[in-house]
Amino acid sequence: MQFYLSVRSLQAATANASMVSIRSASLQPFSPEQWSQHREDRIQLIRKRFVNVHVSDISGGRVVGAKVAVRQMSRDFPFGSAISKTILGNKPYQDWFRKRFNAAVFENELKWYATEPAPGKEDYALADQLLQFVQSSDAVARGHNIFWEDPKYTPWWVKNLTSADQLRAAVAGRIESLLSRYKGDFVHWDVSNEMLHFDFYESRLGRNATTDFFRTAKRADPLATLFLNDFNVVEVCDDLSSSADSYVSRLRQLADAGVTFEGIGLEAHFGKPNIPYVRAVLDKLGTLRLPIWLTEVDISNALDPKTQAAYLEEVLREGFAHPSVDGIMLWTAMDASAACYQMCLTDGNFTNLPAGDVVDRLLGEWQTREVLGATNDRGSFNFSAFLGEYKLSVTYLNSSAEGTFSLARSDDTKHITIRLQP
C-alpha cells in the first residue's frame, strides 16, 4: 500500500520557528494496482493521442474496408543516456546507443576542467567528436555544464585566481568560448550545476553572479533552453539544501533579479526511491509551469542488479507519467573498463544487465511500432498512438495513398483525410 499526502494550507509560525500549522490534510491510500493504473491513465492522456483516418475515393465517397498501415518513425519524448569518449570509434557501443536513444548528454567532456585544463589552453576535440556522433544519430544533445558551483570540480587555475575581476573575466571568457563554438548545437545548457549545495562563484562574485551567467548565456545562444540542475531534490526528503521548497525559493530569487527561467533539472541519483515523494515533488515543481527533466537517472550500485532494475523501472514509469516531465536522461556512460558511475545497462559485450532489460522493455512499451486495420462503414479507422512522427499508407483494390503526419500533445483527436488515387 502506498499513500499520497494532500495538504491544502501550510504555514510556519515565524521565519525561525519549527512549529507548522496545517489547515487541512488528507492521506489517500493507493494499492500498487491503483497506483500503476493511474500512471497508465496519465500516459494515455499526455504521451498518446487519438487519431482518426478518413479514407475517400477520387470522387470524395467514403471507402469501406480500405487497409490502413501506420508505422512510427520517431518518438516525441526525449529519452537518452550519458555518453563519454569511450563511445568514439566503438561501433558496437554506437550501434547499441543508436538503436535505443534519441537524446544524449556528455558525462565530463564539456565541463570547464575538461575543455580548458590550463588558462588559455582550450581543447574541444573530444566534445566536437561526441557532438558529431550525436548529430549523426539524429539525437538531441544537452549541454552539461557551463559552471559547477562545487569547488572540487572547478579548474585548479580558476580556484587560484586572486581577484574578483580576474574571476569575472575568466567566467565571461568561458561562456563566450563555449557558447559561440556550439551556438544552436545543444538544446539545453545546465548554466549552474548544484548551486543549491555549493556556492564557489557566488561566494566570490556576489549573489548576482548566477543572474549574470544566465543573461550572458541567453545572449550567446538565444535558442537554447537554460537550466539549473541539482541533486537530492527528488531522491531524498532529508536534504534541506535541495528540497522542493528551497529549489522554488532559489528560482524565485533569481526570477526577481531578472532571470528568465526555462528549465528545471533534477539529477535523480537514487538509492531506494520513495515514489509517492517523487510524485509530490514533481507536482510541486510542476506548478511553476517550467519544463522538468530528470537529467542523470541511476540507482546506487550498493544494491544488487535486480533491485537496481526494479527501482529504475519505478522511477522511469513515474517520470514518464508526469505531465511536467519533458525528458529523461540516464547516467549510464560506460568507461573503458565497462564500468559506469553507479549503474550500467549492459556488460562490456553489450549484453543487457537487468537494468538494460527494463530500459528495452519500456522503450518498446512507450512507442507505437505499427498499427494495422481497415476502415469501418463510415470510411474511418481510429486508433491511439504515442506522440511522434508517423508514416501512413492506405490501399484499396488497385488504389493507394501514402503520407506522413505528426502527433504533438493535444487533447483533441487528430483527424487525417486521405483520398485514394487510382
Image (cartoon, grey):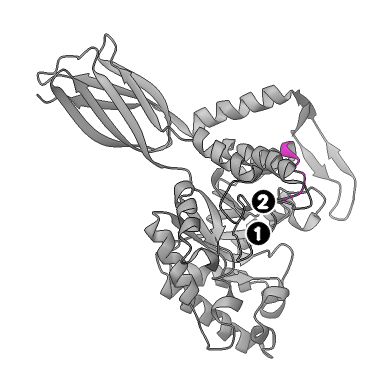
How far from the left and from the top, in percent, is residue 204?
Answer: 70, 80
How far from the left and from the top, in percent, is residue 357?
Answer: 60, 40
- Identify residue for label 1: 340
Q: Which image quadrant: the C terminus?
A: top left
Indicate whether 281 appears above or below 29. below
Q: Which mark is residue 298?
A: 2
Q: Which mark is residue 311?
A: none
Indicate whether 58 appears above or below 214. above
Q: Quadrant of residue 62?
A: top left
Q: Which image quadrant: the N terminus?
A: top right
Callout 1 amino acid: Cys
Callout 2 amino acid: Asp
Does any portion of residue 228 appear in the rendered image? yes
Queried whether the magenta region covers residue 102, the answer comes back as no
Task: Determine whether label 2 and label 1 are within 8 Å by CB.
Answer: yes
Bounds of the magenta segment: 270-275
